[in-house]
Image: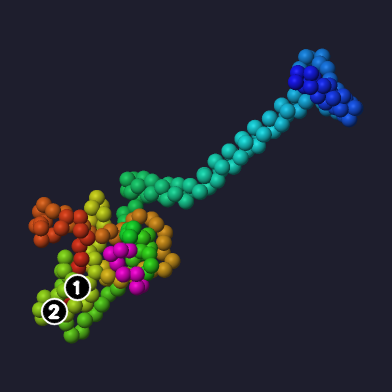
């Protein structure tokens, strides 16, 4: 078997020498680095150039990925910068007050009907003023869906307010079970926000209320 390997090696050497003799040349260059040359160019040098080119391409691809990530983050960065500038202006006393559109902060529509809107989160809240000509008194009752005897039910839904850590979180609004949205107002400025109100046991009597449950509401008139 050893003799056969030697014969194959000799045949391969003869073939390479005959077929590519004018292109591939054996020997060691003056700097002692090249064993073979192709068209008088050092093979090892050519491989080195390929590796450098590949490294350059990889580096450029990484830069492109980084730029794409930066571009994707620009809207969020603009929102953060706007909020920071607003805070600075308020601290400096340059601004007395703002008038914002209110936004829903509802991550799930499981509570509300989707009859008038498929999604509420970050959409603006419309407002309405109603006039009752025959009934003069209006009453909003939290944690109820029906009105007392002698009262007329106008609508029912869920109690909403600002977040508990916000200054105006003590103002509650009864929002209809099938809320509407104001089209084209999805600016997401996080200024005036509507959150569902949950029961917090303690000063609130439980078990009449259930801790963590969203509070329903009804608006009645008489």
Name the residue tied to disc 2.
151
Element type where label 2 sits in the image:
loop
Quarter holding the C terminus is bottom left
Q: In this picture, which residue range is highlighted in magenta?
A: 109-116
What element does badge 1 sit on? Answer: strand
Residue 65 lies left or right of residue 108; in this view the side is: right
Residue nearer the viewer, 113 or 151: 113
- Residue 111 visible to the viewer: yes
Q: Residue furthest bottom?
A: 134
Q: Percent x, y for residue 64?
A: 59, 42
27 versus 68 height, above or below = above
Along the line of sight, the residue nearer the viewer: 140 or 86: 140
- Residue 4 screen position, x and y as percent: 79, 22
- According to the image, label 1 marks what residue? 219
The secondary structure making up most of the magenta span is loop
Tag shown at residue 116: none
| For residue 18, side relative to residue 111 (left or right) | right
Q: Is residue 82 left or right of residue 24?
A: left
Mark 2 vs 1, N-terminal side: 2
Tell me which residue sits at (33%, 60%) in the image: 108
Within 10 Å of disc 2 (Cα), the crowding (few <14, some 14-19, many 20+) is some
Compute the Cα span from label 2 to label 1: 10 Å
Which residue corresponds to the image point at 31% horizontal and 70% vertical from the top-left?
113
Whether the magenta-drawn stretch holds residue 83 is answered as no
Residue 205: name its quadrant.
Answer: bottom left
Residue at 35% across, 55% down: 190
- Which color scheme did the rendering employ for the protein? rainbow
């Amino acid at each position: 078997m050893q003799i056969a390997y030697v014969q194959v090696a000799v045949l391969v050497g003869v073939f390479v020498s005959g077929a590519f003799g004018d292109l591939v040349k054996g020997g060691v260059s003056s700097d002692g680095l090249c064993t073979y040359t192709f068209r008088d160019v050092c093979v090892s040098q050519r491989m080195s150039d390929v590796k450098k080119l590949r490294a350059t391409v990889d580096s450029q691809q990484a830069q492109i990925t980084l730029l794409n990530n930066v571009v994707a983050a620009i809207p969020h960065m603009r929102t953060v910068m706007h909020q920071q500038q607003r805070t600075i202006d308020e601290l400096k006393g340059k601004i007395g007050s703002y008038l914002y559109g209110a936004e829903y902060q509802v991550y799930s529509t499981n509570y509300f009907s989707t009859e008038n809107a498929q999604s509420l989160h970050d959409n603006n809240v419309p407002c309405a003023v109603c006039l009752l000509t025959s009934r003069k008194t209006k009453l909003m009752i939290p944690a109820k869906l029906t009105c007392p005897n002698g009262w007329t039910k106008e609508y029912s839904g869920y109690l909403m307010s600002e977040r508990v850590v916000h200054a105006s979180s003590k103002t509650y609004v009864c929002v209809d079970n099938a809320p509407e949205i104001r089209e084209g107002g999805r600016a997401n400025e996080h200024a005036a926000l509507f959150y569902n109100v949950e029961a917090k046991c303690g000063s609130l009597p439980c078990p009449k209320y259930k801790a963590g449950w969203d509070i329903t509401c009804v608006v009645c008139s008489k």
